[in-house]
Image: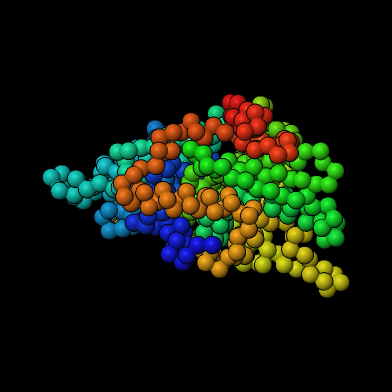
Amino acid sequence: MLSREDNELLTRVGPGTPMGDLLRRFWFPILIADELPVPDCDPMRVRVLGEYFVAWRNTAGVLGLLDARCPHRGADLSQGMSQENGIYCPRCLWKFDVDGNILDLPMEPVDSPLWKVKAPAFKVTEYGGMIWAYLGPQDDVPDLPEFEYTRVDGDQRHVSRFLVECNYMQGVEGGLDASRVAALEKAGSMDKAEILDNEPSHTVEAKSTDYGLLIGTALDADGNVNPELQVTHWLMPFYTTAPADADGILEGVAWVPIDDESTMAFAVTYNPKRKLSKKVLDDIRLGKRVHPQLTEGTLRRSRNRENGFQERKRADGTFVPFADRFRTSFEMAIACQESMGTIVDRSQETLGPNDGAVEGARKILMTAAVDLMEGTIPVIIHKGEAYRVRSYTGETQRGTKFDEDENVRDGINAKV
Ligand code: FES
């Protein structure tokens, strides 16, 4: 539970807000690399943290990221054209380079003071199959987070993005909850009595790390000698990982705020050893794993809040249960987070002992935001190597601390 004031602190991400200032201190993805495929392709309009930007690739193939509002009279630069190493504003054809400098001022004399005008420009780079932005102070650039998937070949990973119609923190909190996602999976494949009979008890522990949280979920079913253990991560400021699967496929999601009430999820599936198999690629195409099916030509999931997550009746008039409408537990978990409203009122919630990761992530983010207001820059922004971790699934000895288990310690180290 949070006070209303703390909920505001946690969820408001626009310019000048404490959390917005904190999030702007990190690199994060804004587009899939294929969306700016070649030099001088059409620019892309990007909305992130409540602001609009234009992302583009100039004639030399160099990426640019400018405030979308033309500094002349505010026309949208993403409606402009990339040509001869500059982007033209659509209104009166001022032309800017990737650093925001003016290259051309049609109809203005050569000695016009307007030549000194600059469009606000931001750091941008291609990394791990995506295009990443850094919107914070441009003289203190953080490390890129060294996620394992950024160091594998392109055919070993798949990345996608899709809209989530709620505040970024609801996405994060849904992604922290590996045990409940597993329970949702079962709910989709069993009847209720079977779930109650077979559901293992879940015990979730979260340990603070330099990058965020190490989360251990013990699943203890009747007859198990030792509980199954799923170890996942929350990494500052909004990255979550899914439990490792039996085939060694790993997955994660970046929950990047579009604004206070909507989020762009960037989902990654990768195989650290070899290229993704046809089976994995087929699953992805069918909307399985962490890549939900989208309404054609949009970034909106086909089962979305507007259509009641495809609420519908069977031929006999009975409603299709919520759990049966989704391809995956992941997709269902997002729907649950959206069903809370665009910004859930956390002063009305009742957390339990297994919600420690949710509480821990909130506390770390809010503390970092307040510290930054007082001048303390988060150490993690210059420790990109701290992101070299992966999820792990194994067994845990009864009575041992999950984070002290040697197998876990080795298992969570990225190998690439
Ligand atoms: S508004 Fe952009 S050049 Fe005039």
Residue 412 seen in the current view: yes
Above-or-below relation of 321 to 299: below
Q: Which residue lies furthest to the bottom in this view?
A: 317
Residue at image position (42%, 51%) is 367
x and y percent of residue 135 in the render? Answer: 37, 46
Quadrant in which the N terminus appears: bottom right
Colour basis:
rainbow
x and y percent of residue 92 in the render? Answer: 29, 54
Q: Residue furthest front?
A: 399
Quadrant in the picture for residue 282: top right
x and y percent of residue 407 in the render? Answer: 67, 29
Residue 220 falls left or right of residue 26: right
Is residue 166 or residue 187 the one in the foreground?
A: 187
Is residue 314 or residue 222 the one in the foreground?
A: 222
x and y percent of residue 200 in the render? Answer: 78, 49
Residue 4 falls left or right of residue 288: left
Looking at the image, how many numbered discs can be counted on the residues?
0
Residue 80 seen in the current view: no
Above-or-below relation of 1 to 240: below
Residue 261 falls left or right of residue 407: left
Quadrant in which the C terminus appears: top right
Is residue 379 or residue 302 the one in the foreground?
A: 379
Residue at image position (67%, 67%) is 308
If the picture is divided into quarters, which one holds ligand 1? bottom left
Residue at image position (59%, 29%) is 414
